[in-house]
Amino acid sequence: MTTPPPEARRKSERISFLVFLGTLLVLFAQMMRAFWVPAGLAAVTVVLCSPIYVWMLARCRGRAYLAAGLSVLALATFVLLPLGGLVSIILTQVIRFSQGLVEQLQNGQLSGALDQLTTWVTQVVVRLDNLVPGDLTGFDASQIDLKGPLVSAGSQVGATLARFAPQAIASTANVGIAVTVWLLFVFVLFVEGKRLFEFVMVISPLASAHELAIAQEVREMIVANFVAIAATAALNGVLLGGIFWASPLEPAGLWAVVAFGMSFVPALGAAAVWITGALYLLATGHSGWALGITIFGLVVIAQTDNVVKPLLMRGRVNIHPLLLMLSLLGGATAMGPAGLVFGPVFVAVLQAALRIYKREFATPI
């Protein structure tokens, strides 16, 4: 029996071990799938907050654990607490608006407008029914009620939002566990992130130059995505704050803060703010302003998410704005809020891989 050369045997052993290691990694990923989102968000957080940790590390004379602990404490103090306050403001204002809207629907000017609309719709239905010989539909026009479903829906919205008030959210174990796990991952990645990255480079079958290129692309995408989202949110706050300041809607400054916060929420975004403001103005008899804010929201505010955000990112990363917009929408659809972060990151990895393949492996035709 012929003994294979040492080089061939070494290569065969390496391939076999990589298969074994890959199987273990797949099983480990399956076991830890509940923690991938907080771990991924922690990795993004560490990339964004690495200057803070470096500054802390210098002040702590190289004591990594102390610097990481102080960095996490600063993150919790200056990010989580203000974020909780912002969520509290948003929910409080939305609950008050829903309660005020229900009152307007029941006894205010909007109630009278709905009564008139109901009367007009009833008359139209009766006239159309009279044009048809016999009672083909069996529909009773006197049963038309436009106010009742709206009052019921407004009351239900207020009750639902009350359950999601910060006090109720803080008391749920799931949120507390998720935040704790996220901060724990942030702490560990601050301390061990560099060594973990070096370990991944060692075991990865990719060339070191390719790994560094992909890592650089991901880092640039993370920073660009955060800057674009924050800039778009600030722009929405300024624009809506300005038009609300000119309108009878008060207080404009609070609405601007709410618009800034809601701009970070997928699917809803700043649209939830100007739609709410327009409905409130309509309910209080300012129909002209309600129409103006609606037009402003559709023409101007809607374009900040669809156009401005991809353009801001396009200036920092070499990805087409349409692809960026699709990655944001697709990521949010597939993964919820976390998809706004992971969608563009996945596209960055894919594009970096395609560039490497085109540069080094593609055969010219």
Image (tube, helix red, strand yellow):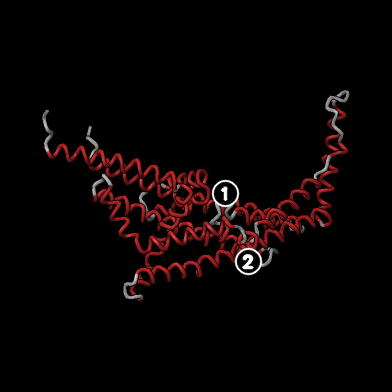
Q: Which residue does the image show at 78% across and 55% down from the upper left? A: 102
Which mark's residue is nearer the viewer, 1 or 2? Answer: 1
* Three-letter code for the amino acid on which mark 2 is drawn: Leu
Q: Position of residue 103 (x, y in %)?
A: 80, 57
Sequence-first disc among 1 and 2: 2
Asked whether, in this view, residue 159 is left or right of residue 361, the answer is: right
Task: In this rendered view, identify the residue nearer to me: 167 or 99.
Answer: 167
* Three-letter code for the amino acid on which mark 1 is drawn: Ala
Query: Relative to 57, is 308 above or below?
Result: above
Q: CA distance from mark 1 to mark 2?
A: 21 Å
Q: Position of residue 278 (x, y in %)?
A: 68, 55
Secondary structure under tag 1 reads loop
- Residue 95's image quarter? bottom right
Task: In this rendered view, identify the residue nearer to me: 73 or 282.
Answer: 73
Task: In this rendered view, identify the residue nearer to me: 58 or 271.
Answer: 58
Task: In this rendered view, identify the residue nearer to me: 68 or 222.
Answer: 68
Quadrant of the image containing the C terminus: top left
Disc 1 residue crowd, few under 14, some 14–19, many 20+, Cα 10 Å: some
